[in-house]
């Protein structure tokens, strides 16, 4: 049984309840998970509260905290295979990505925020009257981190590392579909010397479960969440009662704008990555592909060939590039959208949901849809992309920005000035020109509109995970 980690102990639920952890490739239950509810949520918040109010962690120097976090990162690196396999079995993530991207990024999340917190400069202003004014950043307190299942270890560390580096204590609720790596990470953190109660993990479901209970607690000081936009609304509504600040990283429907003056090989290569990596289960993915009409045929031909050539199947095999979807429920959702694509008059050029009982959707390219189709407008979160033609920059920008979301956008052009113009005009929290997913952890990460509230990364994480205090000294 994968246990909760509360106050430094790994334990089952008080009532012994569990739920199955299903491997989406084998469809077999590979473990049982402690099913937490109100009780476990309360215990975990209480442990985090006590560790914050009375424990050493918030009172340690940034250098001392950084040393513990670096030991944690070293241990995660030493157990890289175990952490990677946890995500492979929990959500069908392909092993090459788990080992090559997710775990290294998890390690660098921890190292980055450990160093960043230690090195960040505070403000100090010399005032006209000789007073000096400065800002201190006090740890906020107890942070609840609610994580999604698409990048389990990576998302957990992206939230937990800055929260800890800035002196907070944490309750992490991983997604019900991806519990294993969270418990592993918490075990390793304890081994690294993180004091008991500083990082707690509660397993369970969201609505009416451990997740909702955590968002209602009056003893929580910050809530950071990544997941569905509707869940973000529910969490914000709960947090409003206690005026708990929230950071919400929600869904997306990224526009990928390909101009005829692009480097076509590069545009195809990145566009494939942008929608089919992690089987399209990426909030940032380029799921709306806008192609300038004069290069439409050539681009689509090459793109469809590249999509069709991806190795789809067993996520445990190093050759595999696209695995199954993370759960039966999610497979059913994506399959329905492929049906909607044809119902709405679209043509599926390659791909579609498999009918062999697996939860695989082959890389799917749809053309001929109107921008009013749900396939064009709604977050599918699978390996399904719709291609629409445009004429000229203004139409491209209008189409790209015609979405309630605003998380990511990208464009491909060899025209430097056009690249800059597009970057300015695309309404999204993250814009990539001639690439995708390249990240510098010092920069803000987050979305506009239905894609969320707040930014994390670098000093933006400090802003969220601390309480800034302004101090003025009389000379
Ligand atoms: P979700 O938003 O329901 O779940 C994400 C996390 O929130 C999980 O840990 C879940 O237990 C928790 N949660 C759910 N409802 C909650 C509540 N009322 N209070 C507190 N915690 C709650 O996402 P789900 O159902 O797993 O995926 C559904 C869709 O959401 C996907 O198909 C995709 O469109 C989108 N999604 C977007 C993600 C992103 O990175 N932006 C990540 C995961 C899902
Ligand atoms: Mg949900």
Image (cartoon, rainbow, N blue to C red):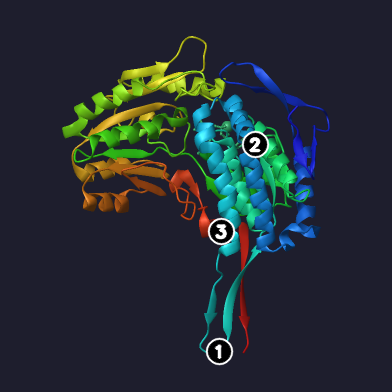
Mark 3 / mark 1, whichever is N-terminal? 3
Single out the mark in the foreground, 2 or 3. Answer: 2
**Which quadrant is the N terminus positioned in?**
top right
Asked if 475 appears above or below 134 in the picture, the reply is: below
- Note whether residue 33 is visible: yes
Q: Quadrant for residue 464, please give it.
A: bottom right
Residue at point 59%, 16% (across, down) = 26
Q: Distance between the residues labelled 2 and 3?
A: 24 Å
Asked if 318 appears above or below 118 in the picture, the reply is: above
Q: Name the residue under label 2.
A: 79
User: Helix, strand, or loop for circle 1?
Assistant: loop
Residue at point 38%, 33% (across, down) = 273
Q: Are marks 3 and 1 in contact (CB under 8 Å)?
A: no
Which quadrant of the render holds ligand 1? Answer: top right
Coordinates of residue 301 in the picture (x, y in percent):
24, 24
Mark 2 / mark 3, whichever is N-terminal? 2
Left/right of residue 72 with respect to residue 254 in the rendered view: right
**Which quadrant is the C terminus positioned in?**
bottom right
Q: Distance between the residues labelled 1 and 2?
A: 54 Å
Mark 1 / mark 2, whichever is N-terminal? 2
- Note whether residue 243 is visible: no
Asked if 316 appears above or below 464 in the picture, the reply is: above
Q: Name the residue under label 1.
A: 130
Q: Mark 3 points at which residue?
A: 116
User: Helix, strand, or loop for circle 2?
Assistant: loop
């Amino acid at each position: 049984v994968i246990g909760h980690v509360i106050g430094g102990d790994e334990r089952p639920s008080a009532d012994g309840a569990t739920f199955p952890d299903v491997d989406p490739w084998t469809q077999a239950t590979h473990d049982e998970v402690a099913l937490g509810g109100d009780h476990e949520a309360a215990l975990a918040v209480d442990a985090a509260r006590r560790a914050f109010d009375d424990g050493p962690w918030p009172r340690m120097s940034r250098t001392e905290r950084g040393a513990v976090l670096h030991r944690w990162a070293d241990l995660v690196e030493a157990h890289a295979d175990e952490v990677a396999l946890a995500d492979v079995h929990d959500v069908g993530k392909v092993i090459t990505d788990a080992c090559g991207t997710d775990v290294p990024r998890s390690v660098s999340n921890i190292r980055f925020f450990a160093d960043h917190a230690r090195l960040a400069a505070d403000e100090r202003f010399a005032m006209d009257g000789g007073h000096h004014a400065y800002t201190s950043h006090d740890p906020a307190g107890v942070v609840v981190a609610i994580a999604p299942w698409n990048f389990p270890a990576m998302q957990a560390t992206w939230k937990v590392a800055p929260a800890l580096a800035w002196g907070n204590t944490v309750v992490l609720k991983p997604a019900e579909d991806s519990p294993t790596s969270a418990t592993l990470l918490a075990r390793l953190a304890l081994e690294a010397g993180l004091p008991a109660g500083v990082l707690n993990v509660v397993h369970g479901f969201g609505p009416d479960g451990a997740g909702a209970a955590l968002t209602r607690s009056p003893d929580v000081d910050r809530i950071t969440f990544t997941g569905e936009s509707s869940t973000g609304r529910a969490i914000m509504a709960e947090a409003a009662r206690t005026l708990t600040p929230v950071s919400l990283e929600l869904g997306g429907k990224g526009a990928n704008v390909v101009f005829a003056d692009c480097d076509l090989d590069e545009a195809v290569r990145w566009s494939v990555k942008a929608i089919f990596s992690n089987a399209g289960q990426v909030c940032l993915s380029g799921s709306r592909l806008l192609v300038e009409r004069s290069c439409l045929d050539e681009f689509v031909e090459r793109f469809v060939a590249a999509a069709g050539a991806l190795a789809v199947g067993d996520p445990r095999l190093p050759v595999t590039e696209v695995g199954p979807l993370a759960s039966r429920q999610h497979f059913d959702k994506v399959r329905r959208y492929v049906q909607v694509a044809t119902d709405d008059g679209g043509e599926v050029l390659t791909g579609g949901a498999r009918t062999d009982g697996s939860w695989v959707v082959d890389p799917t390219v749809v053309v001929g849809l109107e921008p009013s189709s749900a396939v064009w407008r709604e977050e599918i979160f699978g390996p399904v992309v719709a291609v629409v033609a445009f004429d000229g920059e203004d139409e491209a920008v209008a189409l790209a920005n015609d979405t309630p979301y605003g998380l990511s956008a990208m464009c491909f052009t060899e025209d430097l000035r056009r690249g800059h113009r597009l970057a300015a005009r695309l309404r999204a929290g993250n814009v990539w020109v001639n690439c995708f997913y390249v990240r510098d952890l010092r920069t803000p990460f987050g979305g506009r509109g239905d894609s969320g509230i707040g930014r994390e990364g670098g000093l933006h994480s400090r802003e969220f995970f601390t309480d800034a205090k302004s101090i003025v000294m009389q000379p």
